[in-house]
Structures are given as structure tokens and as C-alpha cells.
Image (cartoon, helix red, strand yellow):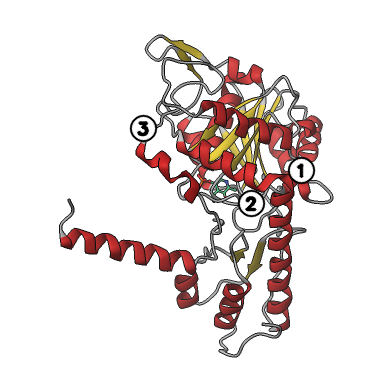
Amino acid sequence: MLSTQDEARLDALYDSMKRANDNFLGYPFAKNFDYSALWRFMDLTGNNLGDPFDEGIYRVDSREFEREVVEFFATHFRAPVDDYWGYVTTGGTEGNTFGLYLGRELYPNGVAYFSRDTHYSVSKGVRLLKLPYAIVRSDAHGQIDYEDLKHQASAHPGQPAIVVANIGTTMKEGRDDVGKIKAALAEAGVRDVYVHSDAALCGPYAPFIEPRPVFDFADGADSVTISGHKFIGAPMPCGVVVTRKYHVQRITRAIDYIGSLDSTLGGSRSAFAPILLWYALRTLGLDGLRSSFEQCEALAAYAVATLTERGVDAWRNAAALTVVFPPVRDEVRAKWQLASQDVSHLIVTPGTTKEQVDALISAMTLTTELVPGC
Ligand SMILES: Cc1ncc(COP(=O)(O)O)c(C=O)c1O
């Protein structure tokens, strides 16, 4: 049993995390999920050790549900019906590292290319994998500069390219175009190309955007990853990576100890994250995901319009949920946990309310009066 003092510490931690959840607009985490129907699983050990598509000795797993989550995203990202593979990861970072790993195993003498707006997990991944790399310029909206990509790749014409395309950069939600990336590399004389699409935030809703971003398997990507806790929402970080079967076959090893194939980066893997994602996808369905996206997009549009009306230089990329503006004062940044580099941003995710957006706008524009329409 916990001591009274420890009980009090837990209560204080809960209150502080709850308050932080309520004032959280700068990082993309959905907040309106309800997984209470799944609490009974917390009494069980769960472990998806091994390959989701292979039976192992382990039975304390949820691999059947994991396969359905992977299947959902494989379909969402237009992978060939009989030629996809994937698993539920610990988040976008693991998905990016895995994509780079598959690229390096396919092209051991490859050079990695990614834009300077790319998430730091990618530069960590290339260091970890000892991949030579080139950082490519990007434009003011966060999209990779195809001319600079061509220019940099021209310096390595005989070497394959392993490219990370951003389908929503961290700060500006800039989206790269896989078709244009491939064209730039072809012009540079690079024939062998592996493309990993980092769709950490946008993956679940990118297929609903018109015109559809050019990022998925039908567009020529070799792997695509998302973070599960960003747009879908989960109490713990998680993600999904999807690739083609033939890429993963290259790295798979049979392991007697687990009676299964080892093809994932982690050994023991959460059995709960796949259950949560499965539950979210089954309860929302495609229509629910789409309508969540549409609500978020309308609120992001409202934030840009209201900030602009109040003289703040705010903007967003087409259909983006990320509202970009000049860096804010320290106290506003601290209260709303806003990431700041050359710009600051607000990210509207499921569960972000108009009241929160209005309160942030009021704080940013140093007024306590309510903004019009609220
Ligand atoms: C574009 C992008 N990729 C990857 C990641 C890493 O995702 P995770 O935090 O789930 O590891 C992030 C996180 O913010 C991101 O914005």
C-alpha cells in the first residue's frame, strides 16, 4: 500500500499533468480520446514480441489487432493489397529509424537526403546507422527545395539515394512531393532511390486533403510512418510504420527463442498500443477521421483569420492544422507549451477547443477582451 505521502505525490502529479493537458497547444497531441472501455487490459501482461504477421510461442499478445491496424494504414496509404508489411511502433522516431534502416539495407552505399526542416529523429537515425547524408534547403513554407536536392545529389550520381520526405514538417507542416523528389534525383542521374515518408502528424488525414499530397505507396514511397498519439490520440506514445514485404524480408531473421521472426526494431513490444489504435480506428472509422480533420481544419482557419485581424502575421499551409506565427513572448510560450524556433506555432488537434484558441489569441495579442464570435 502507498504511504499517505506517496498518495499525495501521485495526486499532485495527476493534477499537474491534467493542468498541462488543458493548456497544451504547441505540440500535436489529440486530447479527446476515451479508452476507458479498455481499462481491463491494464490487469494483464501484454507483449507483441516478434513479427506481427508470424505466429510465435507467445500468446500474451494482440498481434491479430496489430495486423488490422497495419492493414488500415496500408489501405489508407494505397499499398498493394498483397504486398505490404508493418508494425505498431513506439512513435514516429522509431518509424523513421526503421525506414532509414530498410533503406540502408537495400542500398548499403546510399546517401541520405532530407530537408533542413526535417524532425531531429532523422539526423539521429542517420548517425545511428552511419549513413552519409546531405541536408537540403527548404522554402519558407517548409517544403524541400527540389533544385537544391538535384544539386546536392549531382555530387553523388553513382550512389543510391535514401530520401526522407516530410508529409508535414514539425514546425510548419510543410509537405514534400515524392514525385518531384524522384524527378529531381533522376535529373541528377541518381537511379536507385528509396523514399521514406514521414507522415507523423498528417498521415491519418493526408488522404482526405484535396489535392491529395503526393506521399504514399501509389506515389512511389517505400515506407510511410505515422505517430499514433498525434492526430488519433493515445495516453502513451505510439506509431505505425508500413512498408513493402520485400523490403522487410531483407532484414528478417528467425529466432528459435521466441519461435517467431524478428523483423521489428524493438524486441518486447507493447500489446496495448495496437489495441488502443485498433479501438480508435474501429470507433472513428474513415468518416470519423475525416470529420475530425474537417473540424480541426475549420478551427485552424479561424485561428489564422482571427490572428490576422488582430495584426499578427499568422499563416498556414494548404489544409494544414499548424498555424504559424512569429515567436511569442516567453510567458505565453511557457503557459501554452508552444514550440519556438524561427517561428512559433499552434497545432489544432482533435480535442483542441475554440475557447483554448481564443484564450491563446487573447494572451498573444495582450488583451483580455473576448475575440469576436466567442
Ligand atoms: C515530422 C515529425 N516526425 C517525427 C516525429 C517524431 O515522432 P515521435 O515523437 O512520435 O517519436 C515528430 C514529432 O514531433 C514530427 O513532428
Mark 2 and ligand 1: say if the CB distance to the nearest ligand atom is below 8 Å. yes
Q: Position of residue 285 (x, y in %)?
A: 69, 44
Q: Residue at label 3?
A: 45
Q: Amino acid at mark 2?
A: Thr
Q: Residue 58, located in which quarter of the rendered image?
A: top left
Q: If you read the primary sequence from the N terminus, does the residue marked by circle 3 or circle 2 appear first?
A: 3
CB under 8 Å between callouts 1 and 3? no
Q: Amino acid at mark 3?
A: Thr
Q: Position of residue 13 (x, y in %)?
A: 31, 62
- What residue do we see at 42% from left, 15% from top? 57
Q: If you read the primary sequence from the N terminus, does the residue marked by circle 1 or circle 3 appear first?
A: 3
Q: Is residue 255 left or right of residue 31?
A: left
Q: Residues within 10 Å of mark 1 (few under 14, many from 20)?
A: many
Mark 1 or mark 3, whichever is nearer to me = 3
* Residue 64, placed above or below residue 365: above
Q: Is residue 163 left or right of residue 46?
A: right
Secondary structure state at the residue bearing disc 1:
loop
Residue 169 is labelled as 2
